[in-house]
Image (spheres, coloured by chain):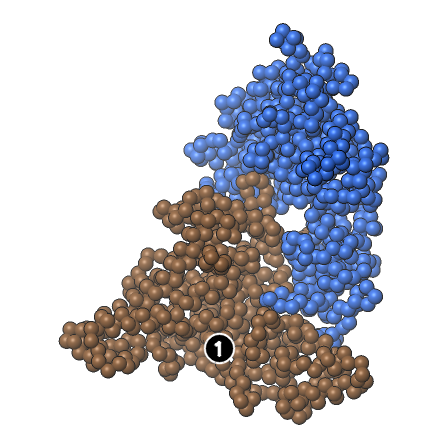
């Protein structure tokens, strides 16, 4: 199906995709998503861009993709103090060293480890050469590390972001000790989210909320980070933003609305916004992918998300949720097939090549359509070449929705995994919380909440939604009833629902309720 | 055969059984009971409903409000409406076939009070026909007044389906339901959610209605009534149910029902009657669920009181699991784990036949002594029987010992339940009901200590103030508790202080309120549900937080977060200066973090 979106397909900024081996998924959903970039890193990457170039600074037009270069600050000394230094705690606690000696003793250790004499002189004034005060500040920042039990290299360890100086970019260190940007974890997923928000009709509001709630320089923890940064350290790198093919998509506005929903919970302290934000971002990305796929394959609607709330206790439902997860993944492959078919069927070189059996035309067709060089010398059956190319595309490591969907959903609390059972769509408590924050401004009836999740994301939980989604529900109505009851039970445990009677329950966003009037 | 016919049969027993756990309790319950009453010739149970008088007064007013009675099945919506109608009309009532009963108002020509017995029982077309008139009545514009019985979900659906545009009435009613408001300005409506108006006296009124039923007189002449050693078990159980002293089934039942309500588990009147009837008539022999006069006599003659134990019947033990789960009354009773908590004091007493423990001719030594003797003679062989029997004895003790007399001692009957601090909860809730509401010092201190331990993660002794910390919210992070504010009484910490507001109904949880001094409208509440209070007091006693449900943890965290946000808001968006927390000799100490402090002082 050639959709109305086709006219809004944006040209690729010059040079941007030169390094990719082919352009297939790039043109379906963008450049790019990688499995190593966990959903939380996606939002960290987005925020990193926002510190330099606020959302809405550059706009895309029908013929012009945003061409944005942004700065990646290194903050090497702060990151050394937080992630690398091992002398501070030890020296501060060492009773054999006199208090007034401790500062000097630590500094000489730290300078040696850092490899630069005088590297930490700037701290003398900030902390009055008192090691206890420095230790206190370092401890505060250490407690702000995201996912600290994961043993990533220290240039890929990150702090939770409540202010601009807390941004830690994903970098690598070469043999000489100098740093440069790396794409190991910040794989451009955050750039795509940035572009989606940038193209949504809510861009100015999102910018204001992001600035106020996540990038506030006056945030107390940010002040600590700022104190630990060397003001004279100016090292940074620059990089260009990735490619998001379509100018307008319903997903962009939906994503922006959810960001506004989460960032609008004024009674939730800033530090608590990040987790629901990355979870709801991941859900939006899944829906974006499935909408793009449906558009490519010509399916009448995106794949629904049949979401288990019973923790796998309802076996039939579990099977159904597993089947639907697989349908999402299969749709990714079907989209690749459709895209390749469509591009080639419209390409004059391909038509000519097939007709005349001309290898040169076939090669040209692949170059033109997918920027892909066929590197074997003779070309036989064109349909076989096409088949091999599709196989190639659906088995790529990077930017392959088929393999990306699983880590995306698993790491955001949308999919559960269990040995001997496999993986299936199932919401974690944290994901339920994220959905409430982004979808409930005050109070709604439970049935309306569940219905809203269906309308916006295609999530099927209760019997009503199953009836709407399917002509013949894949499992009995009783399973969906139990599923809805299980959702309510879990939400009650989290104090998110209030049941008035056996027939009526309300869902409340506890951080947006009107204050108690005394 | 001839002899059996001469035996006294009290029709009240059969009639009460119709209120008990039986498959026949269906949706048209009120009608069903009325027809059973006619059949047996017994007066239906009249449970005093204070609402009836006020509704009657309302409907007799000029421009009476439209009345909507909502609530869970069994809350007595139809019962209340019928009583109102009978009093309004001087005895007239609807027949079972009537869905809507129109009663002409005396003061207005042609206008009526329209009683809708159950809105969910009438067809969609009929509802469409009623809709405009109901809206007009709510707006105070119609000629007719309505009394509508309906559950809240159906009520909202009635408006949602029919109201066009922005659904203003639907939304206002939804808000009223949620906020527990009975009436609001601009709406000629009285909205009574009977699930939320559980009144404390309901247990007494229900038991009295049963125990004081005039038909008990029909037992007179029955030899089982007057037997000294083999008294009729129904009458023995009635004695148990009727007792009013502090250490009684009634006393504890009152506590349990109000604690369940405060924990969000509402017990409807129908369930409460069912529970009382089961206490009275429950039987577990040969698949009999409820006693009748013949069975009662036989069991008494054989001294088989172990089958009629009211302290087991209270938990629905006479029912099969699959039947029992259908009745919420029993799930409420079973949540307390009464009898399953081992306890050295009571167990030793029971095993050694301690004369200090309350005795009971029928349900104490009468059924327990032989089991105990067998166990003492051969513990391995008789362990299982003895285990069941001692659980039952613990249950009897729970319902027979006065907590007031033994609070805080090993003899506290609450030690036999999972709510070891049940007495504290009741004391606290009672104290807040007093004219000068206040929380007993010892409870407040332990509560604060428990909260401080949860908030700071330190095993602190600090109990004079709450140290509000700010959880960082870092994803998968290692938490470092930073102090936001210390809050005590208003005079001690005016910048942010704590109160326990009074006049909370006894069926609601007491509230701990944090008020940011700069703006009292930003107050944040922590409902001290019995489960939460239990958790916090146990933590103060030295229990580890991790052993409690994440639910309590979440509730405290929410309180912390909302308090921090309220404080921030009261300061015009500025962040309070955070402090590092240290433990010094068991007491909390704050240390400022200079680099974190804002530069606003300059």
Q: Quadrant of the N terminus of chain A?
A: bottom left
Classify mark 1: residues with Cα within 10 Å, few (<14), some (14-19) or many (20+).
Answer: some
Residue A366 to residue A316: above or below:
below
Residue A378 in the image: state x and y as whole percent.
22, 80
Q: Looking at this view, is A212 or A495 the one in front?
A: A495
Which is nearer the eye, B438 or A395? A395
Q: Residue furthest bottom?
A: A117
Q: Is residue A54 above or below residue A109?
A: above
Residue occupied by mark 1: A184
The percent position of residue B419, horizontal first and vertical second, equals: 72, 45
On the image, the x and y values in percent for residue B172 come to 56, 45
| Residue located at (66% from left, 11% from top) | B7
| Residue nearest the viewer, comparing A352 with B183 | A352
At a point 75% along the width and 59% down the height, the residue shown is B452
Please give the chain letter of the residue carrying mark 1: A
Secondary structure of the residue carrying numbered label 1: loop
What tint does the image give chain A?
A: brown
As drawn, A518 above or below B28: below
Q: Quadrant of residue A34?
A: bottom left
């Amino acid at each position: 199906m050639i959709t109305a979106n086709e006219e809004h397909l944006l040209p690729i900024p010059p040079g941007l995709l030169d390094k990719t081996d082919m352009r297939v998924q790039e043109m379906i959903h963008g450049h790019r998503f990688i499995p190593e970039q966990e959903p939380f890193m996606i939002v960290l990457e987005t925020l990193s861009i926002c510190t330099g170039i606020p959302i809405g600074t550059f706009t895309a037009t029908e013929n012009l993709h945003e061409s944005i270069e942004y700065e990646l600050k290194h903050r090497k000394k702060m990151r050394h103090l937080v992630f690398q230094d091992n002398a501070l705690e030890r020296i501060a606690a060492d009773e054999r060293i006199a208090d007034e000696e401790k500062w000097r003793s630590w500094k000489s250790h730290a300078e040696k480890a850092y490899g630069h004499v005088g590297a930490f002189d700037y701290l003398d004034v900030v902390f009055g050469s008192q090691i206890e005060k420095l230790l206190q500040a370092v401890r505060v920042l250490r407690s702000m590390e995201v996912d600290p039990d994961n043993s990533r290299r220290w240039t890929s360890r990150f702090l939770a972001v409540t202010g601009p100086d807390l941004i830690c970019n994903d970098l690598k260190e070469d043999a000489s000790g100098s740093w440069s940007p790396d794409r190991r974890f910040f794989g451009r997923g955050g750039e795509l989210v940035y572009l989606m928000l940038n193209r949504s009709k809510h861009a100015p509001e999102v910018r204001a909320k992001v600035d106020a709630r996540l990038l506030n320089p006056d945030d107390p923890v940010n002040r600590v980070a700022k104190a630990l940064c060397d003001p004279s350290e100016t090292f940074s790198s620059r990089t260009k933003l990735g490619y998001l093919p379509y100018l307008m998509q319903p997903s962009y506005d939906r994503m922006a609305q959810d960001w506004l929903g989460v960032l609008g919970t004024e009674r939730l302290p800033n530090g608590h916004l990040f987790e629901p934000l990355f979870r709801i971002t991941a859900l939006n990305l899944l829906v974006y992918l499935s909408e793009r796929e449906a558009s490519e394959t010509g399916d009448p609607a995106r794949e629904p998300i049949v979401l288990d709330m019973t923790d796998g206790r309802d076996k039939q439902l579990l099977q159904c949720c597993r089947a639907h997860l697989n349908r999402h993944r299969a749709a990714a492959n079907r989209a690749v097939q459709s895209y390749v078919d469509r591009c080639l069927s419209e390409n004059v070189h391909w038509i000519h090549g097939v007709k005349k059996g001309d290898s040169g035309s076939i090669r040209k067709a692949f170059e033109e359509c997918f920027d892909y060089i066929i590197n074997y010398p003779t070309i036989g059956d064109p349909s076989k070449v096409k088949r091999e190319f599709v196989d190639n595309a659906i088995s790529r490591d990077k930017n392959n929705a088929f393999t990306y969907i699983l880590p995306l959903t698993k790491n955001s609390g949308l999919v559960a995994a269990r040995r001997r059972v496999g993986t299936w769509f199932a919401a974690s408590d944290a994901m339920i919380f994220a959905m409430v924050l982004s979808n409930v401004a005050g109070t709604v009836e439970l049935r309306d909440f569940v219905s809203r999740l269906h309308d916006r994301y295609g999530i099927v939980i209760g019997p009503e939604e199953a009836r709407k989604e399917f002509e013949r529900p894949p499992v009995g109505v009783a399973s969906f009833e139990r599923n809805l009851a299980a959702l309510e039970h879990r939400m009650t445990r989290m104090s998110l629902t209030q049941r008035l009677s056996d027939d009526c329950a309300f869902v409340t966003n506890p951080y947006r309720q009107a204050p108690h009037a005394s | 055969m001839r002899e059996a016919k001469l035996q006294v049969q009290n029709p009240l027993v059969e009639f009460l059984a119709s209120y008990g756990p039986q498959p026949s309790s269906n949706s048209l319950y009120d009608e069903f009971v009325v027809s059973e009453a006619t059949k047996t010739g017994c007066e239906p149970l009249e449970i005093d409903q204070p609402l009836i008088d006020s509704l009657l007064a309302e409907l007799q007013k000029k421009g009476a409000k439209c009345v909507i009675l909502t609530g869970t099945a069994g809350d007595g919506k139809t019962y209340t409406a019928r009583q109102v109608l009978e009093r309004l009309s001087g005895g007239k009532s609807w027949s079972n076939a009537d869905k809507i009963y129109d009663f002409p108002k005396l003061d207005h020509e042609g206008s009526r009070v329209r009683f809708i017995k159950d809105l969910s029982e009438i067809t969609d077309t009929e509802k469409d026909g009623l809709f405009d008139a109901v809206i007009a009545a709510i707006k105070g514009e119609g000629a007719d007044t309505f009394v509508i019985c309906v559950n809240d979900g159906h009520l909202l659906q009635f408006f949602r389906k029919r109201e066009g545009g922005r659904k203003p009435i639907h939304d206002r009613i939804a808000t009223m339901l949620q906020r527990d408001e009975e009436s609001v300005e601009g709406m000629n409506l009285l909205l009574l959610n009977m699930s939320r108006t559980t009144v404390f006296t309901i247990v007494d009124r229900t038991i009295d209605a049963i125990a004081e039923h005039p038909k008990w007189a029909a037992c007179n002449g029955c030899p089982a009534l007057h037997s000294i050693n083999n008294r009729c078990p129904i009458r023995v159980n009635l004695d148990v149910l009727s007792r009013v002293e502090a250490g009684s089934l009634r006393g504890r039942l009152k506590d349990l029902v109000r604690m369940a309500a405060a924990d969000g588990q509402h017990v409807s009147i129908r369930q409460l009657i069912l529970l009382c009837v089961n206490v009275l008539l429950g039987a577990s022999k040969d698949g009999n669920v409820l006693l009748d006069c013949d069975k009662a006599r036989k069991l008494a003659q054989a001294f088989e009181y172990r089958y009629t134990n009211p302290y087991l019947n209270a938990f629905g033990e006479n029912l099969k699991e699959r039947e029992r789960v259908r009745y919420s009354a029993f799930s409420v009773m079973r949540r307390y784990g009464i009898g399953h908590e081992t306890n050295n004091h009571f167990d030793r007493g029971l095993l050694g036949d301690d004369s200090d423990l309350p005795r009971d001719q029928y349900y104490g030594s009468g059924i327990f002594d032989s089991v105990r003797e067998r166990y003492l003679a051969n513990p391995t062989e008789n362990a299982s029987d003895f285990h069941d029997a001692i659980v039952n004895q613990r249950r009897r003790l729970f319902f027979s010992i006065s907590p007031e007399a033994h609070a805080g001692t090993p003899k506290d009957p609450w030690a036999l339940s999972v709510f070891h601090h049940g007495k504290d909860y009741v004391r606290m809730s009672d104290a807040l009901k007093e004219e000068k509401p206040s929380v007993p010092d010892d409870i407040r201190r332990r509560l604060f200590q428990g909260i401080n331990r949860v908030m700071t993660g330190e095993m602190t002794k600090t109990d004079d103030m709450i140290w509000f910390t700010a959880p960082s919210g870092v994803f998968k992070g290692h938490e470092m508790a930073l102090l936001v504010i210390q809050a005590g009484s208003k005079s001690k910490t005016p910048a942010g202080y704590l109160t326990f507001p009074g006049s909370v109904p006894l069926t609601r949880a007491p509230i701990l309120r944090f008020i940011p001094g700069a703006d009292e409208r930003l107050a944040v509440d922590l409902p001290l549900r019995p489960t939460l209070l239990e958790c916090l007091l146990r933590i103060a006693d030295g229990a580890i937080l991790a052993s409690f449900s994440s639910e309590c943890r979440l509730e405290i965290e929410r309180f912390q977060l909302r308090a921090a946000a309220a404080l921030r808001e009261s300061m015009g968006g500025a962040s309070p200066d955070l402090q590092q927390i240290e433990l010094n000799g068991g007491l909390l100490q704050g240390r400022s973090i200079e680099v974190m402090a804002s530069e606003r002082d300059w």
